[in-house]
Amino acid sequence: MAEGIDATKDQATNEKQTIALDAMTPREKTETDDETANVTTQTMTTTRTDPTAVTVTDKTTPQAETTADANTTSVPTHETAHATSPPRKTRAPLPSQADLFPGSTTSNPNSQPDSANSGPPKQKPNYAPTGLLAKEANTITGTTTVLKYHEPPEARKPPPTQQWRLYVFKQKDLLETLHLYTRSIWLVGRDESITDLYLPHPSISKQHAVIQFRFVSVRDEFGEGKGRVRPYVMDLESANGTSLNGERVEATRFVELRDGDVLGFGESEREFVVMLPPEGSA
C-alpha cells in the first residue's frame, strides 16, 4: 500500500517538473541542465570515494577520463617494441664520399694523380760518369782549349847526367838548340798558346806531336833488369804526320828516340836532330 502511494507521488512530481520545464525560457533550461550535470558529477565523486558505493562507469566526465588515463600504466605491445628497436647492420657497400660531400676538397693520399692534371714526370738522378773531371785535367787553365794528350804515370824528367838536346836545322843552318832534359814533356804544334815547341808552318797541326820522357825497365846483357829514363815521340793524329829518319811513324804510339835520330813534322823543311852528349861535356 505504501509503495503504491510513493509511486503515485513520484509520478505527480515528474509531471510537475515537466510542466515547469516547458514553461522555462531557453536560458533557464540551459542553467538547469548545468546544475543537473554538476549534481551528477558530485554524486559520482562521492560514489568513488565511498567504499560501499556502487561504481558507475557509464557516465564520466572528460576530466575523469583524463585522470584515469594518466594513472593507467601502458604496456608496450610487440609491434611498438619492434618499431623502437635499433636498426640491424647491413652488408651493403657504403656510399661514396664524393656523393655525400660533393664540395669537399680532401683527397686520398693513396690515390694516383690524374695524368691530365699532373705535372711533367720527375727526372731520376743519373750517377753515370760525365767525363768532366778528365776533361778538366786536360784543359789549359783560363782557356777553352782541350789538350789531346795527357802525361802517363811513368812520365819522368831525365836525370842531370843525361842532358838530352834537340838541334833545329833548316837545310844546313842551325836555327835553335833546345835542352830537352829540362822538362818531361814537349808539345809540338802550331797553337802558340799551348805548345812547347811552336812551329808556324801551315802543314803543322795545332797539336801535332809530343816528345815524352818515360821511365822504363830494361835488361842488360847479363839479364839483370834496371830502370832508365828515355825520350819517346808520339804523333797526335796530325793531318800531315810525323817522320822519324825519313819514315812516317804510326799515330798515337810511342816510338823510342835514340842519339842521332832526325825528326820531321808535316811538310816543314826543318829537321830536328836528337843528341845525347857524353857525360861531363858542357
Image: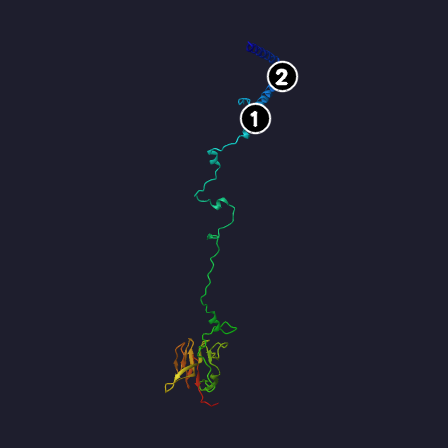
Residue 26 % position (x, y) = 61, 16
Task: Identify residue for label 1.
Answer: 64
Q: Is residue 177 above or below residue 74?
A: below
Answer with mark 2 or mark 1, whichever residue precedes in sequence.
2
Marks 2/1: CA–CA distance: 27 Å
Q: Say if mark 2 contacts mark 1, CB within 8 Å.
A: no
Q: Is residue 203 above or below residue 118?
A: below
Residue 176 % position (x, y) = 48, 85
Q: Is residue 162 above or below residue 115?
A: below
Report helix, strand or loop for mark 2. helix
Residue 233's image quarter?
A: bottom left
Q: Amino acid at mark 1?
A: Ala
Q: Is residue 61 above or below residue 211?
A: above
For mark 2, does the 10 Å Cα neighbourhood hold few (<14), some (14 to 19), or many (20 or more) residues?
few
The label shown at residue 252 is none
Report helix, strand or loop for mark 1. helix
Residue at 62% from the left image edge and 16% from the top image edge? 28
Task: Identify residue for label 2.
Answer: 28
* Closer to us: 22 or 55: 55
How many labels were placed on the picture? 2
Image quadrant in which the N terminus is located: top right
For mark 1, does the 10 Å Cα neighbourhood hold few (<14), some (14 to 19), or many (20 or more) residues?
few
Q: Amino acid at mark 2?
A: Glu
Residue 169's image quarter?
A: bottom left
* Closer to us: 264 or 117: 117
Residue at 49% from the left image edge and 44% from the top image edge? 100
Colour pattern: rainbow
Residue at 48% from the left image edge and 71% from the top image edge? 133
Task: Report the mark closest to the observer, 2 or 1.
Answer: 1
Residue 256 % position (x, y) = 40, 82
* Closer to us: 93 or 282: 93
Classify residue 6 as left or right of residue 117: right
